[in-house]
Amino acid sequence: MPTAPTDRAEPDHRPPPPDGSGELDTIEAVAWRRRSNLRVDPDRAIPHDLVERLCRLASWAPNHHKTRPWKFCAVTGSGRTALGAALAQELAGGGEENPAKIAKARMKYTRAPLVLVVASSDGPDEVCTAENRDAVSAAVQNLLLGATASGLASLWSTGAAARSARVAEVCGFDPTDTVVGLVYLGWPIAEANAPVDRPEPFLCVLDEDPSPDPVT
Ligand SMILES: Cc1cc2nc3c(=O)[nH]c(=O)nc-3n(C[C@H](O)[C@H](O)[C@H](O)COP(=O)(O)O)c2cc1C
């Protein structure tokens, strides 16, 4: 079984046990089980220790130049309606005239006990900003896998909230930060919807040097 990192830098080269419980099997099983699921108990809290642990796990994602671009805001309790109010205000201010849409935005975060808003900080140039965001996306996947392994249901959402300056402000992010996702987390009360289609990915094997261009 995987163990928590220690200060000792001694790599463990032992092969995984041959009983199907190796690390790859474990990761595959957790990744397979992870599904977007918002069927959660909105009133059953998630211990703060677990939230901290999941954010720490997220921060172990690969990160070019070690810029540590991730920022998290754990929205819970009445913070969920404060966040919803911020989004509703932004929608109304942006010309949304459908009152049902505004009302829905106001209450949407109360569907789960916790919404973790995840942002990526800007870099000094376009490439760094893009790579920061890539790193934060990898961090979100770490978080989702950790949540699944903890028995939590999760859903990564974006939409208008991810582009809302008010939402970012309420979360304590800088105006130059980008919200990469709002991750709903909660204890499941039902399975996710229909099984998701997971076709084999494109995999190109390049095993030899390509033939050199003919000399003309
Ligand atoms: C960047 C990103 C944004 C997403 N935004 C939303 C969203 O706004 N609303 C939603 O219901 N699902 C959202 N999803 C979840 C996907 O719809 C979901 O992952 C996909 O349907 C596959 O299902 P699965 O997560 O159960 O495997 C988002 C996923 C990603 C990676």
Image (cartoon, rainbow, N blue to C red):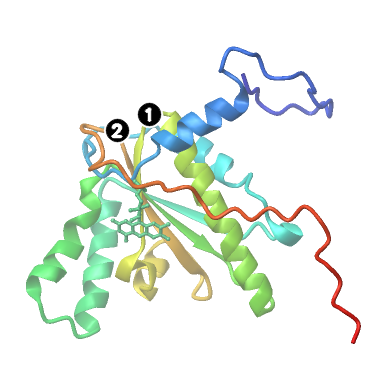
Precedes in sequence: disc 1 or disc 2: 1
Ligand 1: give its quadrant: bottom left
Q: Mark 1 points at which residue?
A: 151
Q: In this view, does 3 lie to the left or right of 200?
A: right
On the question of residue 215 being in view, the answer is yes
Q: Which residue is drawn at 82% across and 26% down?
A: 8
The reply to whether the residue tagged 1 has its Cβ within 8 angstroms of ligand 1 is no
Secondary element at image label 1: loop
Q: Could you classify mark 1 by the number of other residues whose Cα lies within 10 Å: few (under 14), some (14-19), or many (20 or more)? A: few
In the rendered image, the quadrant that contains the C terminus is: bottom right
Q: Name the residue under label 2.
A: 187
- The residue depicted at 30 percent of the width and 53 percent of the height is 79
Give how far across and how far down residue 121 sits, in percent.
58, 67
Position of residue 156 in the picture relative to residue 68 (left or right): left
Badge 2: few (under 14), some or many (20 or more) residues near its Cα, within 10 Å? Answer: many
Which quadrant of the rendered structure holds the N terminus? top right
Q: Which mark is residue 59?
A: none
Asked if marks 1 and 2 touch (Cβ < 8 Å), the reply is yes
Q: Which amino acid does label 2 sit on?
A: Trp
